[in-house]
Each structure stands twice: as C-alpha cells, then as structure tokens.
Amino acid sequence: MYPFTGAEGAVAMGSAITESASRDLLIQQMVSTITELDGQTAIENALQWLRRECGSERAMFYQFKGPLLLTFITSNVDDAWGKAYRQHELITQDPVIRCYRNQLGFINWQDAFRQYPVSARYDELVEAGGLLPAISYGYTNHCRGTDSVTSVCTLGEVERMISAEQKYLMSSLMPVLHSVARGLKFCSRGLTHRELEVLQWARDGKTA
C-alpha cells in the first residue's frame, strides 16, 4: 500500500506504474531480440544488454548439471578464466556453484567465498580477471526432465550494488536464457514467434 492519500497517492501510484511498465518494456525488447541464427549469439547479446543496464564491466552465463558444465558464455571476461572454466578446472571448486547445490536466486560472491573458501589458484584467477565485486543469479526450470539443469548469470565488476529494478531485469530474463541455452546443442536455427511467446509466458509464470 502507498503511504499517501488523495493527489499525492495518485501521483505516487502513477509513478510506480510507469516505472514498472518501463522495466517490462525493456525486458520485452530484449526478449524480442533473441531471434538470432544461433542461441550463443543471442545469449552474448543478452549479456551485453545486462552489462549496460546494470552497470557491469563483465558478465557470464553458464549452465550445469551435477558436475558437468553444459554451457559457458562470457562478455568481456579474461580469456584465462574462460579457458580454465571450460576445461572444468574451476567448476568443482566454484563457491557460487556450491551454494547453488542448496539454494537458488541471488548470491553475492563475497558471501559465497566466505561460506566456501577458495584455493590460491582460484583467487588468483578471480583477481586477474577483475571479476569482483560480483553478483550471480541461479535459476532452474522444474519441468519434468529439466529440473536437474541449473543456469547461472553473473555480473562482474559492478559499479555499485545493483538495485531492485536491475535485479528484476536480471531475474526476468533468466527463464529465456535458460531455455535458449538448453537448445544450443539441439538446433542451430533462430527462434520462431511461437517459441518466443512460450518463453515470454515462462517469464511471466504462465503455462502454454
């Protein structure tokens, strides 16, 4: 409820509705651009968009199932980090991934590092890559056959603590990225209008 009455209440409510509509429009615009010829390019574009909207120097999207890394895509991230991650050197000791074994949602990297101390090698790669401060969002789809696959989106070297609005953008886009990444190994065509509609429904918590 708004702590205003009369004209003040109407102005406050109108402002909140406008802000919400603007956020939803941003998300719709981003979702509508995911029509590239391949899913990897679409995810790369989405990461660039998130970096711009959330004031982040770097971004990563990765998807895993148990100890197996399925997808790993970065935006402006040091090659050494990407190479080590793709060679499965880091996923087994990644404190963020270890946190996501038990919970999903937003995780601050500093909190994850306190809970699961990292090796000197891991710490060295994080520092060399300029990843901190960083925040991640973990997501999974509980549909049959997919609930063991987890997607993680990370924003690294963020300018400041991301706002509630920026968290909303990030979390709203994740169902789309999760679905696109799931299809990377199975198709190389762009998404159809119908598929985009289904992804938008998934973001809104609806079913087809």
Image (spheres, rainbow, N blue to C red):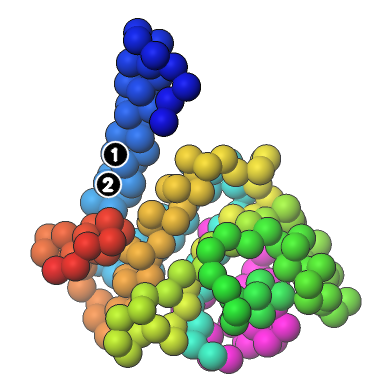
Q: Quadrant location of the N terminus?
A: top left
Query: What's the residue at 59%, 81% (across, down)?
Result: 101
Q: Residue at x 39, y 83 (%)?
A: 147
Q: Residue furthest left?
A: 194
Magenta-colored stretch includes residue 81:
yes
The amino acid pointed to by label 2 is Gln
Q: Secondary structure at mark 1?
A: helix
Relative horizontal placement of residue 122, taking residue 149 as reference (left or right): right
Q: Residue at x 51, y 73 (%)?
A: 62
Q: Is residue 67 above or below residue 132?
A: below
Report the residue marked by disc 2.
Answer: 28
Q: Which residues are magenta?
A: 67-94
| Pick the front one: 80 or 52 | 52
Residue hosting label 1 = 25
Q: Outermost residue toward the top? A: 7
Please provide percent x and percent y for residue 4: 44, 17
Residue found 35% across the figure and 8% down from its top: 7
Q: Verify CB contact (< 8 Å) between mark 2 and mark 1.
A: yes
State which quadrant residue 87 falls in.
Answer: bottom right
Is 120 placed left or right of 54 in the picture? right
Q: Within the magenta stretch, is there residue 188?
A: no
180 horizontally vs 65: left or right: left
| Callout 2: SS | helix
